[in-house]
Amino acid sequence: MRRVARMSVLGSCLLLFATQTPAQENSAPATPRLPDGTPNLGPLADGKGYWEGGSGPLVGGADYPPPEEIPFRPWARAVYEYRKSTLAKDDPHARCAPPGGPRQMAVPFGLQIVQAPSIQRIYILSGGSTRPWREVYMDGRRHPEGDFLNPSYFGHSVGHWDGDTLVIDTVGFNERFWIHREGYPHTEALHLVERISRPDLMTLRYEITIDDPLAYHEPWSTSWTKRWNPNEEFIEYFCQDNNLDPAHLVGQ
């Protein structure tokens, strides 16, 4: 009995060592924070770094459910099937249109998030395309209504913190961009909710809920992570002067 007990203790110690060692070996530096304790979703004091590829298989590391799991309305499925059959040759982003909605988090040239607490704004900057930026209001305002809501590529975004997670609510999109490179469509009724967190220095977690009752029977969600590149800055890339995408538009 005593031998069994000794082996049990030894086995427990080995199990504890086995479960602790990978975490220690793979641990990343902790989440950086601003002076007020808010998670810093962007660069540190040296100003370097940006968010590059992600954990998913699509452009920019995006990860979306397969089409058979998407609750398309019939017309939206037909649009997607057409874009698929023509190899996405009509993708507006490849013709220098801004990457609207979640497409901004899935472009090949990365992105940057800049927090400006003094003016209660957060800016999401695109490294490619036309180098556009998106403004997120953190001052508690509501979305404009009626004619005051002018549909645009980035819509009207308001945000708040839910613990260490930034929650962004956006409406007022135009229909001139694709949700992602594979061609899922949307309408001006799109209501996008994003949850962005930084569990450690090197990781950004991005979660979205797509609610567009004109294009989909019900809301649907997805998520992926992005990697932090700590040593470089955006390349100076302006699509209008150096469009690198047309050669990839092989569809007919």
Image: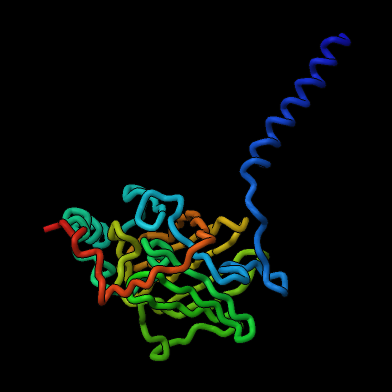
- Quarter that holds the N terminus: top right
Residue that protrudes farthest toward the bottom in the picture: 147
> Which residue is painted at 66% across and 64% down in the image?
32
> Which residue is painted at 61% across and 64% down in the image?
165
- Quarter that holds the C terminus: bottom left
The residue closer to the viewer here, 233 or 112, is 233
**Left-right relation of 112 to 108:** right
Q: Is residue 18 above or below residue 194?
A: above
Please state the horizontal and vertical placement of residue 31, each as a whole percent of the image: 65, 60
> Which colour style is shown?
rainbow
Residue 129: image quadrant is bottom left
Residue 106: image quadrant is bottom left
Q: Is residue 115 above or below residue 118?
A: above
**Left-right relation of 244 to 157:** left
Please state the horizontal and vertical placement of residue 174, each as a whole percent of the image: 33, 77
Q: How many marks?
A: 0
The residue closer to the viewer here, 148 or 43, is 43
Residue that protrudes farthest toward the left in the picture: 252
Residue that protrudes farthest toward the right in the picture: 2
Please state the horizontal and vertical placement of residue 241, each as a whole percent of the image: 25, 76
> Which residue is painted at 28% across and 73% down in the image?
239
> Which residue is painted at 39% across and 53% down in the image?
64
The reply to whether residue 73 is visible in this rendering is no
The residue closer to the viewer here, 198 or 178, is 198
The reply to whether residue 155 is visible in this rendering is yes
Residue 156: image quadrant is bottom left
